[in-house]
Amino acid sequence: MTVLLAVARGAVLTVLLAVASACGGGGGSDVSKEPPRFDENPQFRAIGGISMGAYGALNVGTKHPEGFGTIAALGGPVDLHQLLLDTAASALEVKPQTEIPRNVGEDFTFDHLPPYPGRDVNLSLLKDLFISFGNPFLHHPDPTRLYLAADSEPAAIGMDDAFGPFARTADVRGFLDGGDSNDDGLRQTGEAPAFFTDVLLAAKGSLATLAPGAVAAPVGDRDLADLNGDGIYDVGDGIVENFSEPFTDSDGNGFRDEGEAFQDLGLDGVAGTGDFGEGNGAFDTDPDVASWLAEDPTTRLGSESAADISRQRLYFDVGTNDEFGFAKHYDNLVTVLSDKGVPVAVQDGFRGGCASLPEFDSAFQLVRYEGGHVGIPTTVPSAIPSPEISTRPSANMPVSTAT
């Protein structure tokens, strides 16, 4: 039997191959025998992963049903559509608020990020995602310069429907952030920024629009404000998000559906700038959105027939209090499969244990357990080991951060 186990350390996927002989052999091997084909006996081959590895396992496995009979995706971002929505709604949203969100499901913003996995790791993960799939929030017209926010079309135009005219940061690598010394996801007024954001575009000068009358403190070439004097920055210059042209989201799903009205103003939502999509008579999203969805296993399964999906066995589990919000991903995935006529057995909590392994009755199984990301039961920063941040070279930049 062949088992592929995908193990995630932050955003880096490591693939381990373990091969066990199914029939034993007398201690030797016939080197003249042809190795088995990838599409031979897929029922004896499985692929599985944890965290980001769960995404990798489900993505690779659903791309190659001829080779993998079983897929196990444990606690990862299995719905890139949902990940895009969550990134726009929380990770990049900038607005004035003095109440500090700390728990799963509360109203996080770019300046009030979750305590797990901490501010530095969250920003590093954004970089990794944008390097891997493209930046779906900033259009880059030059295919040879697809990384830096400073090379994007919005940076060159300097106009946005949310912030009006804005200035760019002085350094081409953008503003400085990070330096979250206590790993609480926030920026204390005494914490110095530690690294360039590279892929994020700050709308310099927009703090006055977002929080009129706030006292600005320049930090890493982005103006920030502590609105209530508690030593924590609550809001700052906005982060430009040009995901799509403006539209009326009647059903609130974050994506434009057929029939929903839109304004043909280009991605920046401002008339007369001549940016991508303006005046072409069609609704436009950033081209990198298609790159994300092309690598989305939930979208892929939604396009297949029940018969094709049923060629494989699918096992999932996720913590109901996953700090990244991945529990919602699995709810969406179950809905997609159910709508295709593929019933998923949903179980709350694990049966059995190390001494009594559970046996599942269904070929499609989701186990929801009480806990956080991949089993972590708490969001107290001191109780959670932080992933290490390493540096590695990038084709477009001298150095980028990844975990």
Image: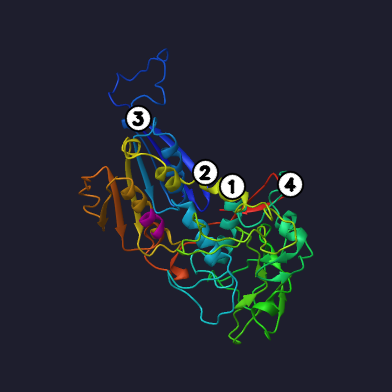
Q: Could you say where residue 93 lies in the image, as x and y percent from the top left? A: 58, 68
Q: Could you say where residue 90 lies in the image, as x and y percent from the top left? A: 53, 67
Q: Residue at x 73, y 65 (%)?
A: 159
Position of residue 22 relative to residue 86, above or below, is above
Q: Which residue is mark 2?
A: 294
- Which kind of residue does numbered mark 1 sit on? Ser
Lower sequence index among marks 3 and 2: 3
| Segment colored magenta | 328-332
Position of residue 91 relative to residue 31, above or below, is below
Q: Which residue is mark 3?
A: 42
Lower sequence index among marks 1 and 2: 1
- Which kind of residue does numbered mark 2 sit on? Ala
Q: Residue at x 79, y 65 (%)?
A: 170
User: Which circle, 1 or 4, is nearer the viewer?
Assistant: 4
The disc label shown at residue 142, or none: 4
Mark 3 packing: few (<14 Cα in 10 Å), some, or many (20+)? many
Lower sequence index among marks 3 and 4: 3
Q: Give me the C-alpha separation between circle 3 and circle 4.
A: 42 Å
Q: Nearer the viewer, residue 75 or 105?
A: 105
- Which kind of residue does numbered mark 4 sit on? Asp
Q: Quadrant of residue 21?
A: top left
